């Protein structure tokens, strides 16, 4: 049975206590963060964390992010915290930045996917912070079945997990809409492992030019990089380029797919005549916020193909294109 708790008006002490009790009993609670919804369990409890992997169908070597609410929490899960970590945490926490650090032995290796490092962040969402403070640091990946688009609304979580987890906290839409930026501080050079809700440019303003390693070449430093991701049921095709040429290409593709008897959905900022249409918004911030919702809504219309318009790779656009490319599994058309 799944208890859905309405907290759209913000954290409520009594309701937080109910959710925290589930966590302390080793159960699963989906909760909103400023990035996407997380599927949370007591990060220090092996049996609870194991269930996250089971219900998501997540490969056991793909580690989870531990969500903390204080610097004391951070010291409970990470050791040998380097000065860069302190600098970044002081500047960007709470916020959409995950730091990979050496893990304490107290953190079960189920949580870290078998690694000796742990990924940690402090979410900037009042409900997430209240839940962690009322319980314990939470291991929480995105609250979607592995491989599907991440959830930005409680309805998305329910679509994937209703009846299979104990509790969903409905806190309305998540404001950023893409997952956190992950940076590895456990080895010599700070390295960005995943672009996300905090633009890389902002981190570089603190640390200087950064190495960015988001493509899995050989052994992936971030295990999540090697898996299929963010994919709706429909096949996704991304069209990248400038202005009128993109519009022409999208129109051409719509016709081509339809002539083959396929149902076509389009996610773009201009309206197209197709079987489904979703406008993710004008600014990169809006596109980030609406991206996963668009993929899920077009999927619900039962389209066979989703044609998605690319965005400029600046600021949050880097994270958006990273998610779109993965959703498309390499089907990118540049015009
Ligand atoms: P998700 O929980 O779905 O947002 O995914 C978490 C991301 O963080 C995945 O891409 C993981 O591979 C990455 N990650 C988590 N822990 C580590 C770690 N200890 N070392 C490297 N990458 C990590
Ligand atoms: Mg995920």
Image (spheres, grey):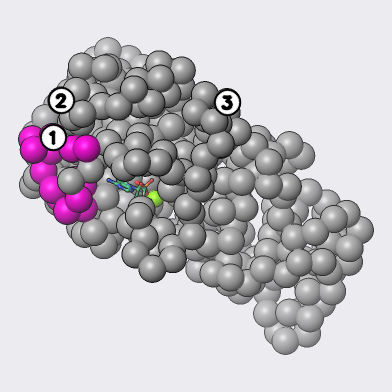
The crowd level at tag 3 (other Cα within 10 Å; few <14, some 14-19, many 20+) is few
Going by the image, does 155 lie left or right of 17? right
**The label number, if any, that marks residue 104 in the structure image:** 1
Q: Secondary structure at mark 1?
A: loop
Question: Which is the main secondary structure of the residues drawn in magenta?
Answer: loop
Pick whichever, 206 or 283, lies toward us: 206
Is 329 located above or below residue 215 in the figure?
below
Going by the image, does 133 lie left or right of 179? left
Query: N-terminal of the two: label 2 or label 1?
Result: 2
Pick whichever, 4 or 93, lies toward us: 93
Picture residue at 46% right of the left edge, 43% below the top = 192
Is 139 located above or below residue 249 in the figure?
above
Q: Is residue 74 visible?
A: yes
For the record, the magenta segment spans: 102-115
Q: Secondary structure at mark 2?
A: helix
- Res 124 → quadrant: top left
Is 27 located above or below residue 130 in the figure?
below
Label 1 with label 3: CB-CB less than 8 Å: no
Task: Report the residue marked by disc 2.
Answer: 76
Going by the image, does 111 lie left or right of 149? left
Going by the image, does 244 lie left or right of 313? right
**The label number, if any, that marks residue 205 in the structure image:** 3
Picture residue at 73% right of the left edge, 79% below the top = 257
Q: CA distance from mark 1 to mark 3?
A: 29 Å
Residue 68 spot, x, y in % from top left: 27, 25
Is 261 located above or below residue 301 in the figure?
below
């Amino acid at each position: 049975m799944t208890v859905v708790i309405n907290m759209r008006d913000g954290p409520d002490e009594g309701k937080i206590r109910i959710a925290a009790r589930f966590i302390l009993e080793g159960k699963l609670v989906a909760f909103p963060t400023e990035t996407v919804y997380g599927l949370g369990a007591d990060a220090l409890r092996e049996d609870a964390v194991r269930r996250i992997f089971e219900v998501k169908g997540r490969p056991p070597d793909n580690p989870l992010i531990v969500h903390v609410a204080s610097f004391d929490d951070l010291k409970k899960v990470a050791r040998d915290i380097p000065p860069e970590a302190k600098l970044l945490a002081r500047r960007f926490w709470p916020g959409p930045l995950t730091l990979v650090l050496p893990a304490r032995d107290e953190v079960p290796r189920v949580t870290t996917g078998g690694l000796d490092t742990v990924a940690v962040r402090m979410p900037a969402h009042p409900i997430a912070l209240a839940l962690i403070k009322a319980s314990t640091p939470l291991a929480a990946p995105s609250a979607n079945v592995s491989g599907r688009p991440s959830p930005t609304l409680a309805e998305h979580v329910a679509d994937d997990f209703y009846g299979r987890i104990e509790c969903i906290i409905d806190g309305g839409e998540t404001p950023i809409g893409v997952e956190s930026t992950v940076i590895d501080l456990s080895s010599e050079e700070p390295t960005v492992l995943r672009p996300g809700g905090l633009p890389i440019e902002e981190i570089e303003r603190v640390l200087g030019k950064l190495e960015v390693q988001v493509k899995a070449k050989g052994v992936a430093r971030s295990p999540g990089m090697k898996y299929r991701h963010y994919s709706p049921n429909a096949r996704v095709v991304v069209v990248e380029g400038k202005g009128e040429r993109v519009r022409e290409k999208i129109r051409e593709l719509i016709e081509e797919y339809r002539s083959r008897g396929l149902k076509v959905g389009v996610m773009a900022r201009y309206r197209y005549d197709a079987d489904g249409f979703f406008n993710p918004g004008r600014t990169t911030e809006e596109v980030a916020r609406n991206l996963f919702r668009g993929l899920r809504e077009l999927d619900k219309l039962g389209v066979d193909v989703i044609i998605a318009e690319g965005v400029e790779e600046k600021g949050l656009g880097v994270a958006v294109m990273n998610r779109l490319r993965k959703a498309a599994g390499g089907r990118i058309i540049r015009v």
